[in-house]
Image: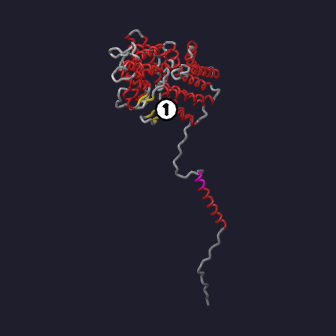
Amino acid sequence: MNIYHKRAIFRRRDESSVYRMFFWVILILGGIWLIRSVRQGDIKPLFLPTATPTRFAGSYVLEAEALFTAGKLDDTKDAEGNVISNGAISSYLEATKVDPNNAKVWADLARVQTYSSAMIVNRDDIKARLAEALVSAEKAVELAPDDSYVHSIYAFTLDWNADSRLIEDPREISRLLQEAEQEAARALQLDNTNTLALAFSAEILVDQQKWTQADQNIKQALQRNASLMDVHRINAYVLESLGEYALAIEAYDRAIAITPNLTFLYQYAGANYRRLAFDSPNEDIQRELYEKSLDYFAQTARINEQLGVQDPGPYLSIAKTYSQMGEFFIAIRNVQKTIEFEPSQAELYGELGVLYHKNRNYETGILALKCAVRGCTEEESCAGRGECGKNDIPAVVIGLPLTNGTVYYYDIYASELAALHKLPKNNYCPEALLVASEIEAKEFDNDPNIAADIVVVRNICNDLPFGISADLTPTVESAIPSAIPTATP
């Protein structure tokens, strides 16, 4: 009898392997470690966008050098103040962020900041820019106290800060010039072949009125290296100081040939042509020289337009040239053009007021000079510039403080107020006398022309024998000094 064994209904499971358990523990622990690493940033998730490569300082420096050569020192901005494209200064600043211990980059930044001040009109903005340049130069010296190039740039920056148009205290000017002289000497002590240091020392010597030594230094610098723009610019400056305006123009032309887009070089050359024209006794030659001056300023405006630079400087220089030519209407139109660029710039209203005065438009001149001296509202700013056109932006204007550089505006303002005080509904004398008192308090009466103006203002307002002529032309006009043009834009 065959007996068949019954099959087990349930199959017995195999026992778990120790190795298999160990594998699962390792896998779990690895997963926990991976998750924590991703969260902590030690491991980057897949498919993230590729990181942007960091630029080297040298890349920014090359960009800055190219922008400087192209004449783009400052950022280009739109009407709302937004940066459209960077200038050389911004590129150098980026380089200092990438490589903050690079003394040469700081020195190069200081050089460009200093030169950029020549393209600024507002006195406070010029002072601020030169102060920034001084900080950059001091940083360079701190990083490399034994570097000749660094000390030469520091000397250059100190010299441009010692500007009598910006600083009232002659002792401060003297201190800055003395320090600049010491820095130039230090640069030459560290490297007696440093051509830039020798050239900058010549510029400092001119400002110290040591013309003979300055002439010797710049001639030596030219013999060493005639390929540097700075050397030719300073040679022109030395020649200007010696009254050699024609030779100064030739030197500026050589500087322009090296860096043809630095507009302040054209400004300086044009100003020298204007000075030659003023001194010329021949009317035909004078006219020709004025035309050459205008050509240089027009070239400046064209370069700025190509670069997208909003610089009122060339139009102001054009206005001064036409003013010397006696063509005040064209001069006025050019100053109005400058105000389109900087509608809150008080100096521009001062220049416009002077031109209105010369054009015998005294009533509008008072409105413009009020903006320059006292400041004005948006509505008043339009009246001061002869009404706002389609390109004009009404702006609040802050009045200028009374200084050596602005006393001329105060002087003409007080004179015109006094001269027109008898016109219907005009009560200008209280303001005229107040401005006269402010001028006296500052002791500008050391200038005989200003002192004479103040006397006339007081006599007019006190109804003494200095009144208004029958055609309402102020008799004070003859007492207001006519500025002799200098070789400045």
Tell me: residue 27, above or below residue 203. Answer: below
Few, some or many residues within 10 Å of mark 1 (<14, 14–19, 20+): many
Residue 276 locus on image (x, y percent): 44, 13
Q: As drawn, which residue projects farthest toward the right? A: 18
Q: Amino acid at mark 1?
A: Gly
Q: As drawn, which residue projects farthest toward the top? A: 281
Q: Residue at x 54, y 38 (%)?
A: 55
The residue where tag 1 is placed is: 87
Element carrying mark 1: loop
Q: Quadrant of residue 266?
A: top left
Q: Is residue 256 visible?
A: no
Quarter of the C terminus within the rendering: top left
- The magenta region covers 36-40
Please state if 108 lies on the left or on the right of 79 as rendered.
right
Quarter of the N terminus within the rendering: bottom right
Does the magenta run of residues contain 262? no
Please state if 16 lies on the left or on the right of 456 as rendered.
right
Work out whether residue 145 or residue 230 is closer to the camera in this orientation and state it.
145
Q: As drawn, which residue projects farthest toward the bottom? A: 1
Q: Residue at x 40, y 19 (%)?
A: 418
Q: Quadrant of residue 272?
A: top left
